[in-house]
Image (tube, rainbow, N blue to C red):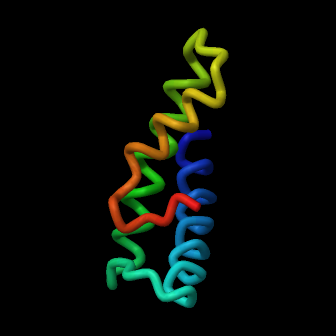
Amino acid sequence: MRVKLDSLMQHRVRLALEVFSEQGAQVPENRDETAAFVSGGTVGSIVLWALSDETDAEGWTTRMQSFMPAWWPLS
């Protein structure tokens, strides 16, 4: 299940990188490595959250945003 989620997330990250680039954001050139890196951390955090008793989705989202690379647009 985690492998499938990671594969789907990498696809979504690649799409996001294309959009960010089209909007003028400076994104890393190696999109495959970047997608793998961002996806791996995101999926790992999702799994950790899903297996926890944490109920504060907004707090989790805020923490997730703070872990994103500095070049990742947050708005």
Q: Residue at x 55, y 41 (%)?
A: 2
Is residue 16 placed above or below 19 in the rendered structure?
above
Quarter residue 8 falls in: bottom right
Q: Residue at x 34, y 70 (%)?
A: 33
**Left or right side of 72 for 1:** right
Question: Furthest-front residue in view?
Answer: 75
Quarter residue 7 falls in: bottom right
Q: Residue at x 60, y 81 (%)?
A: 19
Quarter residue 31 falls in: bottom left
Q: Residue at x 65, y 27 (%)?
A: 57
Which is more toward the observer, 18 or 47? 18
Position of residue 73 measured from the top left corner of the image (x, y, whole percent): 49, 65
Q: Quadrant of the C terminus?
A: bottom right
Position of residue 13 measured from the top left corner of the image (x, y, whole percent): 54, 66
Question: Furthest-top residue in view?
Answer: 53
Tally the marks.
0
Q: Quadrant of the N terminus?
A: top right
Position of residue 64 measured from the top left corner of the image (x, y, whole percent): 48, 40
Is residue 64 placed above or below 59 in the rendered structure?
below
**Left or right side of 38 for 22:** right
Which is more toward the observer, 72 or 14? 72
Position of residue 35 measured from the top left corner of the image (x, y, whole percent): 44, 66
